[in-house]
Structures are given as structure tokens and as C-alpha cells.
Amino acid sequence: IRITMKMTLKAISITVAMFLGVMSNSVAQSFEPTTSWPYIYPDFIQGQLIMTSGKTLTGLYNICLEGSTLHFIEGEMVKEASTLDIISVQIGNDIYVNAGGKIIKTVGKAEKGVVAVESIIDMAKLNETGGAYGSSSSTNATMSLSSLEGIGGRANMNHMELKNAKESGRVLPIITKYYLVFNGKSVPANKKDIDALKGIDKDALKSYYKSNKIKWRDPASLCSLIDFIAKQQSTL
């Protein structure tokens, strides 16, 4: 998956090095996003946006779970930032990078790149049928999706109106997906996608697998894999 903007490894590394040591999930841990507030954080949080132009903008930011996009406050309105303008953004103590046009959270820093996690709405689970006493919940599911689309799909919405309505929605089921971000690309962290990469000695990769038991959801394990792959691609 090619990163859609001109994001350099140097820019990512500098950003992550500045903030990764103080990353914390404390704000988000006690909060559950809902269909009427499909955001990672319970409110918009002070942060810094690093743009492809080189500018750094301070503002109030949040990550919308629908599409993994960056939303910000302008005046009283919620607006969506163009991923073409984003290299990375710090929200509170968390760092997000632009990976393939999605704004996803860094959870580990390798020498040659970063490990990042995308939080995704489990739409299948959200739309499960079978309401109370065996009745169908399809109507509730439709209402939930309508509410979600109203927030995630529209710009220029009033911040306070959204905030006041966030308790009225259903809790969103969330799944997470890990990525390796390096050499100007974003690769899903799984054996199939890694094996399909070009510029890697396949015998060396098999040997690496044998010597290193890869844990596909462990940032430390994935950081080591990033450096191995990046070194392979630079020598072939």
C-alpha cells in the first residue's frame, strides 16, 4: 500500500522520537466510542499537526474511526483534514502517522520505520441481528449506521451538538490492525503480505522466521522485522 503523500522516513522518525517516550492511552482507556461519537477520544484534544509543507499547526484534534481520518475544531465546527497535507499528528501524548492515507497510531519505533495500529469499526458485529427476546435488531442497526454516517461522512458539523449527542448512540465494537510503516510504504503486519514484498531474499526471510518467532501483534517483534526487511531491500 503506497503512502499517498510525500512522507519521508526522516520526518516520521523525528516526530516519533520526540513524542513516543511519553505515549499514553490513559485518556482513551476509560472511553468507549459510540455510533453518535465515532472518535478515539472523548473530546477533541490539544495537539500538533506536522504538514507536508513543513508547517506545524497547534489545534484541537481527534481521530474519526470511520476511515481513520483526522478531524479538528475550527471555530465551533468540526472539520476533516486532508490526508494529502498530513505527515503526522500528536494528539495528547499519542503520535499518529499518515499510512496509505489513513491516520493511524504509532506503537513502536524501529531504526528504519515505525509500527502502527489502526482502530477499525467492526461493522459486522455492529450489524448483528437478534434483539431482546429473539426479536430482530435490524431497525436498530439501520439507525446506528445512519447516525454513524451522519458524523463520519459530513464536514462542517457543530462540535457541541455532536458532543451533546454522543451518549445517545450504541457502543462501537472495535478491532485493531497492525502495520509496518517504512521505506515510503505501509504493509499489513502478517506473513502473507510480508512474503509478497519485493526486494527480499526469500531464503534469508525463511531463515529469519526460523530464528525469530514473530509475534504479529507485538511492537518489539515487529520493529525487529522492519529493520530486517529494510536492510534486505537496501542491499538487493
Image (cartoon, helix red, strand yellow):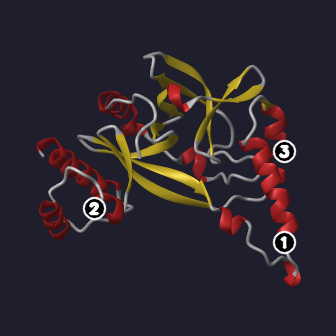
Q: Residue at x 66, y 51 (%)?
A: 31
Q: Nearer the viewer, mark 2 or mark 1?
A: 2
User: Is there CB contact under 8 Å for labels 2 and 1?
Assistant: no
Q: Residue at x 23, y 53 (%)?
A: 224
Q: Nearer the viewer, mark 3 or mark 2?
A: 2
The extreme bottom residue here reads: 134
Q: Position of residue 236 (x, y in %)?
A: 12, 46
Total numbered badges shown on the rendered structure: 3
Q: Which mark is residue 137?
A: 1
Given residues 235 and 127, the one toward you in this image is 235
Mark 1 and mark 3: Cα distance apart in space: 21 Å
Q: Residue at x 76, y 50 (%)?
A: 148
Q: Residue at x 73, y 53 (%)?
A: 34
Q: Which mark is residue 195?
A: 2
Q: Which mark is residue 163?
A: none
Given residues 140 and 17, the one toward you in this image is 140
Amino acid marked by disc 1: Ser
Q: Is residue 74 left or right of residue 219?
A: right
Q: Considering only order in the chain, which callout, 3 or 1, is on the residue closer to the N terminus?
A: 1
Mark 2 and mark 1: Cα distance apart in space: 42 Å
SS under mark 3: helix
Mark 3 and mark 2: Cα distance apart in space: 46 Å
Amino acid marked by disc 3: Ala
Residue under label 3, please give it: 165
Given residues 94 and 142, the one toward you in this image is 142
User: Is there CB contact under 8 Å for labels 1 and 3?
Assistant: no
Amino acid marked by disc 2: Asp
Q: Considering only order in the chain, which callout, 2 or 3, is on the residue closer to the N terminus?
A: 3
Q: Considering only order in the chain, which callout, 1 or 2, is on the residue closer to the N terminus?
A: 1
Rendering quarter of residue 193: bottom left
